Image: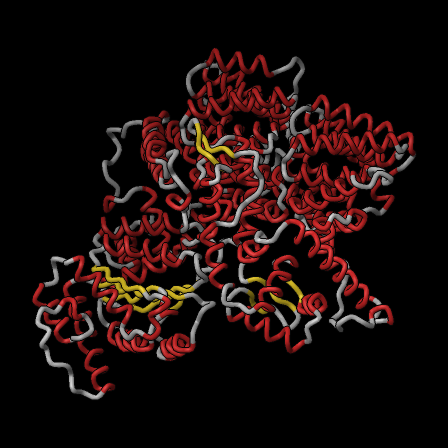
Amino acid sequence: MQASATPSVIAPILVGRAGQLETLRGLVDLAKRGEGHVTTISGEAGVGKSRLVAEAKGYAAKQGFLVLQGNCFPADSNYPYAPLLDLLRSLFASHPTDIPAAELNSLVRKIYPLLPEFVSDQTIPLSQLEPEQEKRRLFAVLANFFLRLSTRSPVLLIIEDVHWSDDTSLDFLHSLARHALSQSILLVATYRHDEIPPSLSNWLAQMNRSRLTQEIRLLPLTRVEVDTMLAVIFDTKHTSLDMRRFLHGELLDTLFTLTEGNPFFVEETLTTLIAAGDIFYAAGFWNRSASREISVPQSIQDGVQRRTEYLGESARHVLTLAAVAGRHFDFALLQQLTSYDEQQLLRIMKELVVAQLVVEESGERFAFRHALTRRAIYTQLLKRERRMLHEAIAETLEKLISATAHDHTQDASNLVPTPHLSFDAYLEDLAYHFYLAGAWEKTLDYAYRAGEKALRLYSHRAAVDYFTWALEAIDHLPSTPASPVLYRALGQAHETLGEFEQAEQNYTRALETARLLQNRQAEWQSLIDLGFLWAERDYIKTETWFRQALALAQSLADPMLYARSLNRVGNWYLNVEQPDEALRYHQEALSIFEQLNDPHGIAETLDLLGMASYLGGDLIKGTAYYTQAIKLFRETGNRQGLTSSLATLAMRGPTFHTDMMVAAGSLAEAQHDAQNAFKIAREIGQRSAEAYALFQLGLCLGSQGEYTRALAAAQTSLDIAEEIEHHQWQAAAHAMLGGIYRGLLALPQARQHFEQALLLAQEVGSLFWTRMSTGYLASTAIQMKDLSYAEKVLQAGSSPGDQARTMAQRLLWCATSELELARGNPARALEILDELDAFDPNVGEGQGSLLILKLRGEALAALQQPIEAEAAFARAREIAREYGARPVLWHIYLASGNLYLARGRNVEAEQEFAAARTLIEELATNIDNEPLRNNFLDQATALLPQQHPQLPKQAPGGLTAREREVALLIAQGKSNAEIAESLVVSKRTIETHIGNIMYKLGCTSRTQIAVWAVETGLAER
C-alpha cells in the first residue's frame, strides 16, 4: 500500500459479494455456450451494483465477449432510446476491429435521425411510418444488429440505472430479451430498488411473467463484512497496533452505524477522514490523529442540500426536529413538538418521503432514509440550537411515555394520544437527549439504566458511552457520590472490548470506592474483576487478587461469594499445572452451588471442571462436564459462558494439541463447535472470546489438513490478541501457528512461532503454556535434526519428579520419547510411552491415543518387534481415519510402509506408500500459498522411499492406490458423498479422482468404471 493510496481507489467493494459474482460468471459461461440470459441487479445507491458489473465485465472480456454498456441519467426518462444511444456512441467511439465500418454506417442510416452526428449525408429522408410502426421498425433494426454481433462473438449488454430509463428503451429491452435466450447474449440491467417508477415496475412485472429474467439483490454489508473491508483496505502489515485497535473497535462501530454497511458511503467517509488528516500514512504505516469526530463526506452533504432546497418552510422545520430526534423518530413526538394537527403533519411527512429524505417504517414511526442524511442536517445546526432542541425533545418524550404509562390520566390531558410507550424501550433516547441537553440528574438516571440494558444486549461499545455519560453527570453533581457499581460496569464493557488499561483503571476505582464506602461485597467483586483481568497477562498478580477475594468471602460468611472465589483460585491452580488442587477447589464450589440450587454457578463450575479435566489429561471426563455446562448455559441464556465452553470442547478431538490422550470426538465435530463459539463471540462483541474461539478453530482445521483456513483463523486470532494485548491468547495463537506450519513441514517458521509462544508464556507466568510451547519446540527441533537444542529445551522446561499426567506434561514426555528414538534408544522411548499409557485413565479395551500409538509403532519397529509394531500402526491408522486426522495419517502410512519394506512385504509396503502419496497430494490442494505448497510437496515426497525395484511400476489401468480404492467403491454402488466419508476426504477430492480415473481408462461414466473394476478382477480382489 502506497502513501498516496485512498479508500476510493483500494476499497474492496466486492467484500460479501462472492456469491453474486459467481452467479454472474456462471451466466457469462452459459451465454458463451449460446444460452442467453437476462438478469437484473438491484440495490440502494452505493451498495456496489456498478462494482459488481465491472467485475463481470472483466471476466466476460477474458472469455472473448464483446462488452457493450449504456447508462441512464436522471434527465433520460423523457428521452427515447437514451441508454441505447449512449451505448452506441460508446461503441462507435471505441471502433471495435471485429465490426466492419460499413455495418456501423448502415446502422446509423437505418435509425436516422437518432444518431445524426454519425451520418455524413443529412438529406436522408425521414420515415413516413405511423409512430407505432416506426417504433417496431427501429426495434427490429436494433435487435438484428445486436443479434448479428452475437454470431461473431458472445455479447455482454449492460444497461445501468434503468430506474431513470425512458419507456421506449424498456420496451425494446423486453423485446430483445425474448430473442436473446437462444443467442450468445447476456443482458444485465441495474436499478435502485428504492426508486422504482411505475414504468420500471411494469417492465419488471412483464419480465417476471414471461420468466425472462432473474434478479440479483444486493444488500448492505453486515458489520462483519465492513470489518473485513477495513482489514483489507488498511493491511495489517501497514497498520500500527493502535490503529488496528481503532479500526476494529471504535471506527468500525461508528462507521457501521453511520453508513449502515453501504460500501460507497464507507469509501466516502474514509476518504473524508484521510483528506482531513484524521487517518494518515507515515513511515510505512497507517496511523490516526487524536481527533475522534467523523465528518459527513462533502458528496453526501451536497446531495442532502439539493434535496432540501425545494422543501417548504414547514417541512424544513420538521426535518430539523427529526434530525435532532434521531435516526428513527415517532409521529406523535413530532406532532407534540410542532403542535401541527394530524393532517398537516401527514402532508409534511409525505413531502419528506417524496424528497427521498425519510421513509415510513410503520403507521407511527418514520426514519431517515440513511443515517448520513440525518447527520448532514444535524451538523448544520449551531451548538446552542442543538442543546435547546435536545432538551425540548427529551422532556416531551418523557411526558409522552409517562402519559401512556398512566393511561392518559388528567396530567396528560394536553398531550396528543399515542400508542403505549415504555421507558425501557426509550432509555437510550432519553439518555442521549438529556446528556446533550446538559440535564445532569436525568442523564445519570437514564444513562446508567441504558448502559445496563446495553450490557444485557452485548452492545459493549454503547455501554461504554452510557456509563461514561453517567460518570460525567456525577462530576457535574457535587452532592452525588460516585458508585463502585458504575465503575465496575464501565470496566466490564472495556474488558469485553479488549481495552485493558481502561478496564483496570475502572476496576481499581471501583475497588477504592467500595473500600471508601465500606461496601464489602462490592470490594469482593472488584478483587475478582481485577483477578480475571490480570489473568490475561500476569498469573502472579492474578493469584494475589483471587487470594484476597477468597479471604474476604470467608470473612463475610457468604456461601455464594465463597464458591465463586473457590472457582477462581482453582482455575489459577490449573494454569500453574496443579490440576488435582484445581479439581478439589472446583468440586467444593460445585457442592455449594448445588446446595444453593444456583444454575448459573453450577454451569460455570462445570465449565471449569471440564477445563481442569482436559488440561489434567482426561478428555472423556472433561467432555462429559462440558456437555452438561453447555446445556445449562443455553438454558440460562449465558452466551459468554456458552462461547467459552464450545470453544474449549473443540479440544476433545485428536488435535495436535491433544493427540497424546484418548480422544472423545471427531475433528469435524470439534470444528463445528469452534465455529459456533466464534459466531457467538462475534455476536456478543467479546474480543477475547473471539480470539480464543479462532485459535481453537485453527487448531481443528490444521489437525485435519485444512491448512489455508487454519492459518487464516490462527493469524486472525493473533491479530485480535495483539490488539487487545491479551498475552495469554497471543501465546496460544503463536502455538497454533507453529503447529500448523509444522504440519506443513515449514519447520523454520514453526520454530519461530513456538519460540515466541514460549517467551510470551513465561512473561505471563502460565506454566501450562510454558510446558506446551516447550514440548512443541523440542519436537520441531528433533524434526530439524537439532537434537542438542531439543535436549536443552526439554531440560529447561522440565522439573524433577514431573509425572506424565497433565496435557502439557504428556506433550513434554512425548517429545522426550521422540528424542530417544532419534538418538537410537528405542527401548527408553518405549518405557516413556508405557508410562504415558499408565497415567492415561482411558487407555485400555482397545482405546489408545493417536500420537502415542504412532510413536509406539516406531519404537517397536526399531526393536525388531514387527507384529506388535504393525498392531500399533493399525490401531493408529483406524483412529486417524475415524476422527479425520489426515496429517498424522500420511505419517502413519509412511511408517507402516517402512515396516513392511524392512520385512520384505513389498506389495503391502507399496500400498502404504501409495496411500501416503495420495494423501500428501490431497493435503497439498488445501494450501493456497504456492511456496508453502511446493515446500510441503518437496519435503513430504523426500520422506518417501524411492520405488522398490521389485514392485510393479504401474497399477492396473495406470491407477494409483487411492484411485483403485475409489473405483472399487464405485463398483460397490457408493455415491461421491459416501466415498468421501469412507476415505475421510472432501467430495471435491473424490470428483477429482473420478475425473483422473475416467481420463486414464478412457471411460465416460461411473458405470464404465464399475464394469472395468469387475472385468479386471479389482472388485473381486
Q: Nearer the viewer, residue 164 or 120?
A: 120
Where residue 554 sits in the image (x, y, percent)? Answer: 89, 30
Q: Is residue 877 visible?
A: no
Where residue 800 sits in the image (x, y, percent)? Answer: 66, 13
Q: Is residue 259 left or right of residue 482?
A: left
Answer with the quarter of the image where residue 391 lies: bottom right
Answer with the quarter of the image where residue 709 lies: top left
Where residue 327 sits in the image (x, y, percent)? Answer: 61, 58
x 72%, y 32%: residue: 532
How many badges with numbers are in the image?
0
Answer with the quarter of the image where residue 144 lies: bottom left
Coloring scheme used: secondary structure
x 82%, y 69%: residue: 412
Q: Nearer the viewer, residue 60 or 585?
A: 60
Q: Is residue 735 left or right of residue 611?
A: left
Q: Is residue 1004 visible?
A: yes
Vertical placement of residue 614 versus 131, above or below? above
Q: Nearer the viewer, residue 592 or 211?
A: 211
x 18%, y 66%: residue: 150
Residue at the bottom extreme, as displayed = 130
Where residue 869 sits in the image (x, y, percent)? Answer: 47, 28
Vertical placement of residue 904 versus 447, above or below? above
x 44%, y 45%: residue: 984
